[in-house]
Image: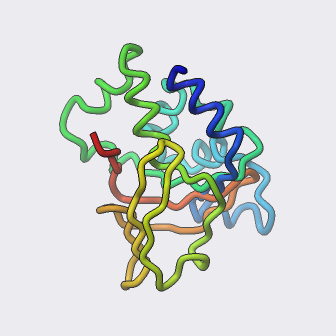
Amino acid sequence: MTLMKRMAVAISMLTVTAVSVPAVHSAHHGAAKADIVDTAIAAGTFETLVAAVQAADLVAVLKGEGPFTVFAPTDDAFAALPEGTVENLLKPENQDQLVAVLTYHVLPSKVMAGDIAGQALSVATVQGSEIAVDATGDSVMINDATVVAADVKASNGVIHVIDKVILPPQ
């Protein structure tokens, strides 16, 4: 089974919530009307993430019913990767690797900040590997990335904004 088929099967079996950016969230006052992808586009700080989602052919999945939890790296987070990393991942021949990186940022359930407050957990991602979530200190850590904005609501999930791109184990 190809990675894309595995992804489609995994997503169809999962409930995930996406987190959106506070400026966008406040504009909706209550129930979010935009899905995860449209929320990320409207925020203006996730252009690289949106381009990667498009290159990985995951737009339809992340516009799907969900719910999804997405740990969304900012453009600055992608810019901090070693030179050429993003360009290399966006090449068509590296689509499987790009899908693996992106789905490592997605959980198969809705997780709001309040759900994990005071806990340290190991959580399975859609990609299949686990991430370390540490909400015991002054900030919430996802592996070595810090959550800089939490609980950004979208119509099909929640987005938690992180300051680094997290990479799945090799």
- Answer above or below: position of 7 versus 128: above
Q: Which of 8 and 141 is in front in this view?
A: 8
- Position of 41 with respect to 124 (left or right) is right
Q: Residue 93 in the image: x percent, y percent? A: 37, 14
Residue 3 is situated, as x and y percent measured from the top left of the image, at 50, 26
The image shows residue 67 at horizontal and vertical percentages of 71, 52
Residue 120 sits in quarter: bottom left
Q: Which residue does the image show at 42% across and 48% down from the upper left?
A: 129
- Front-lying residue, 49 or 3: 3
Residue 139, image x, y percentages: 39, 78
Residue at the image position 72 percent from the left and 48 percent from the top:
66
Question: For this view, does 41 lie left or right of residue 47?
Answer: right
Q: Is residue 148 found left or right of 42 in the rendered image?
A: left
Looking at this rendering, what residue extends furthest in the left direction? Answer: 83
Tell me the residue at 65%/56% (across/down): 17
Quadrant of the rendered image containing residue 48: top left
Image quadrant for the C terminus? top left
